[in-house]
Each structure stands twice: as structure tokens, then as C-alpha cells.
Image (spheres, rainbow, N blue to C red):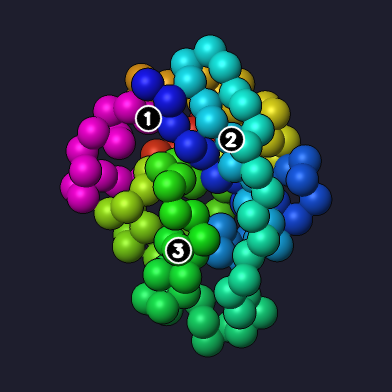
């Protein structure tokens, strides 16, 4: 099985240390258990600088539209919309910055992502943070 995975980034190298919906860009990869292929870079077109917008269902919908076709969302932080996003995606939390390192972790924990995806609308986010 392959998944389309969206990484929240401002610099194209690291995940952002702010909410997923506040990134400037999203790098989309097609990832299998052993391979990762870069697909595209999508620009965030939401109003991420408006503090009142955090946790807003409309923002969740806009991010969902930007991420159309993506199944897994990866970042260091998610806001209140993580619950809404879990119905359509598998949000994955990391405590590392580098996207290439995150891809290696995804390869090593691929079965957990598959299990979470298969839960459908009952899915919850995953945390791949070190203990």
C-alpha cells in the first residue's frame, strides 16, 4: 500500500514548529513501506496569520481542500482541528524537525499508519515522538 503524505514546512527541509495549518507550504510525498517519492509542493492559501482563525472549522475545511488526495498529515504541532482532520486523514506528530528523518520513521512504523488509516472516521492521530 502507498500513502500520499503531506509535511508542513516553511523551508522545504524541516517541519514547522507551529500548527499544521500555519505552514507556508506542504511537501507531498508518495510513501510505501520502503520507498518515498516527492510528488509536489502545495502553497497554503488560508489566512494563517489570523489568531481568531485557529480551531475554526472553516480553516479545517480549507486545509482539507488543499490536502485533497493526501491521506497522512505530518508535523510537530496540530491545533484544535486535529479532531476534525482525523476524520479524513491520519495526523502524525513528530518531535524531530527534518522531513527526511521523518520519512525514515514512517518507513519503520508503516504498519501503525496502515492500521490507523483503516479505522476510517474513527481514527485518531498518531504520535511518533520519542519518549
Please give the name of the residue rendered at 62% of the width and 26% of the height, measured from the top-left corner.
37
The reply to whether residue 8 is visible in this rendering is: yes
Q: Which residue is mark 2?
A: 29
Taking the image as shown, residue 89 lies to the left or right of residue 95, namely left
Secondary structure type for disc 2? strand
Q: Which residue is mark 3?
A: 65
Please give the name of the residue rendered at 45% of the width and 63% of the height, measured from the top-left corner.
65
Magenta stretch, residue numbers: 113-125
- In the displayed structure, 97 sits above or below 108; it is below
As measured in the structure, the alpha-carbon distance from the residue carrying label 2 to the one carrying label 3 is: 17 Å
The nearer-to-camera label among 1 and 3 is: 3
The N terminus: image quadrant: top left
Q: Quadrant of residue 12?
A: top right
Q: Residues within 10 Å of mark 1 (few under 14, many from 20)?
A: some
Please give the name of the residue rendered at 80% of the width and 50% of the height, measured from the top-left corner.
11
Q: Is residue 93 magenta?
A: no
Q: Which residue is mark 1?
A: 113
Q: Residues within 10 Å of mark 3 (few under 14, many from 20)?
A: few
User: Closest to the observer: 88 or 125?
Assistant: 88
- In the displayed structure, 45 sits above or below 92; it is below
Q: Are marks 2 and 3 in contact (CB under 8 Å)?
A: no
Secondary structure mostly taken by the magenta-highlighted segment of the chain: helix
Amino acid at each position: 500500500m502507498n500513502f500520499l503524505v503531506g509535511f508542513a514546512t516553511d523551508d522545504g527541509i524541516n517541519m514547522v514548529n507551529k500548527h499544521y495549518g500555519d505552514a507556508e507550504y506542504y511537501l507531498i510525498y508518495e510513501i510505501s513501506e520502503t520507498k518515498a517519492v516527492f510528488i509536489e509542493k502545495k502553497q497554503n492559501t488560508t489566512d494563517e496569520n489570523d489568531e481568531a482563525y485557529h480551531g475554526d472549522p472553516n480553516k479545517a475545511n480549507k486545509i482539507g481542500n488543499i490536502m485533497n488526495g493526501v491521506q497522512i498529515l505530518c508535523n510537530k504541532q496540530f491545533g484544535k482541528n486535529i479532531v476534525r482532520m482525523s476524520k479524513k486523514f491520519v495526523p502524525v506528530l513528530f518531535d524531530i524537525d527534518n522531513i527526511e528523518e521523518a520519512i525514515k520513521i514512517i518507513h519503520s512504523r508503516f504498519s501503525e499508519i496502515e492500521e490507523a488509516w483503516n479505522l476510517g472516521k474513527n481514527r485518531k492521530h498518531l504520535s511518533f515522538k520519542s519518549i
